[in-house]
Image (cartoon, grey):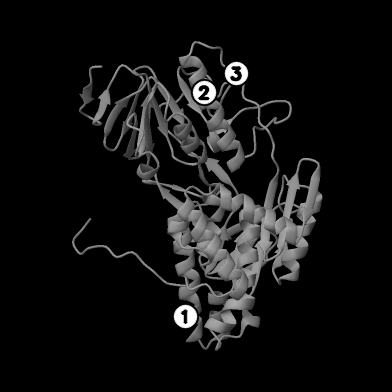
Amino acid sequence: MSEKIQTKFNVPETDRERIVIIGAGFAGLELAKRLAKSKYQVVLLDKNNYHQFQPLFYQVAMAGLEPSSIVFPLRKMFQRNKHIHIRVTEVDRVDTEKQQIFTDIGYLNYDYLVLAIGAYTNFFGNESIAKKSISMKSVGEALYLRNEILSDYEKALITPDYDERQKLLDIVVVGGGPTGVEVCGSLAEMKMHVIPKDYPELNVSEIEIHLLQGGDSLLAGMSENASQGALDYLTELGVKVQLNTRVEDYDGEKVYIKGGQTIPTHKMIWAAGIVGNKIKGLPESCIQRGNRLAVNDYLEVEGVHRIFAVGDVAVLKSDEYPYGHPQVAQVAIQMGRFLAKNFDRQSKGKLREKFAYSDKGSMATVGRNKAVVDLPGWKFKGAFAWLVWLFVHLFSLVGFRNRFIVFFNWIVNYLTYDQSLRLIIRPKQRKGKN
């Protein structure tokens, strides 16, 4: 087999058809893993050289886990697969006619392109909120939040003025989905069990945790049992939950709520929604509400040739899912697995199959022995639900080392509430480096 190096990207041109996957999240990674021994050449692109386990970002932010325990190096995963090539880059645009993508390290030809580009935080056009609030869509953002929380506790120790101290201590979380609920639960447990030991000079009764939800219930999409259970648990933990509450603005000092209410705080965590990442060059006709890409039953992007979309950025409408499938990990994983199967069938000359999502349920944890789980035909909450949540998330992590470390950290946290990860670590840039 002859090989010619494509100089602009340093990927060999071979007789194998090339599948380019943009994004190493749940969908892109699952697809690449399933294609590792296929007849295709696979090029996996991501702006990071690792996969991030997003459901546990909040535990990094709350100093419950170290960042390295929920990420996994991509090159380590594919060390033995010579037909998978990994490049760390950001994709700028796609030329659908020439079947090329353009990135900050050059261009690359493709036979098939898979967009697994995920989603980012939706600020609904409010520039002030986008600039001043804190989101959690990456390990870096989770670490930033951890630094902010711990730094403000340090400042609160030496702030005699009550009003100024309250701004440092109080936290507002916007969005009552799984992320908002889990963050508030962790913050409440930190207030009860960690702050009194680490900061005995602080009066923990001054710390207020606010959860603001625009709708009339928490955990939209889950059952009424789960929603009410989460609300009861958070209330029990002392979280001030406000439903049917719309945030209009945030200036870094106060949260402005529709109706005139304000909450002074230096930290507002924004978990109120997501919007699909964009890539230039696709026709406007395929872009749906929330920047999601319309796909057919085979996950092909409508209106273009040989381009597929999977995960959060894909929207496949049906009678059961008129607005597309939920933007959760299980959907992304099943899409990646399905598409790999269809590529395999295609390489063998077989007919492709249509995507069908199998709903395996949903869950959220609020704190120790407090979780809610919705399974098909069975809905439950409490300590058993919490154990199920731990088991599912533990075995969803990539790599034995990560599973072991997370399990060990969880055991320590459960027995002592005293994890030694409450460190303020800030990146330092070399002088003179741009």
Q: Secondary structure at mark 2?
A: loop
**Is the C-beta separation of discs 2 and 3 under 8 Å?**
no
* Quadrant of the frame with the C terminus: bottom left
Alpha carbon distance from label 2 to label 3:
16 Å
Within 10 Å of disc 2 (Cα), the crowding (few <14, some 14-19, many 20+) is many
**Is the C-beta separation of discs 3 and 1 under 8 Å?**
no
Amino acid found under the numbered disc labelled 2: Val
- The residue under label 2 is 301
Disc nearest the viewer among 3 and 1: 3
Q: Secondary structure at mark 3?
A: loop
| Residue displayed at 71% across by 43% down | 361
Up-down relation of residue 48 to residue 6 (above or below): below
The label on residue 102 is: none
Amino acid found under the numbered disc labelled 1: Glu
- The residue under label 3 is 353
Question: To which quarter of the image does residue 20 belong?
Answer: top left
Residue 189 lies left or right of residue 308; in this view the side is: right
* Quadrant of the frame with the N terminus: top left
Q: Earlier in the sequence, mark 2 or mark 3?
A: 2
Image position, residue 110 (x, y; %): 36, 22
Q: Secondary structure at mark 1?
A: helix
Image position, residue 36 (x, y; %): 42, 31
- The residue under label 1 is 154
Disc nearest the viewer among 2 and 3: 3
Alpha carbon distance from label 1 to label 2:
50 Å
Q: Earlier in the sequence, mark 1 or mark 2?
A: 1
Within 10 Å of disc 1 (Cα), the crowding (few <14, some 14-19, many 20+) is some
Residue 372 lies left or right of residue 188; in this view the side is: right
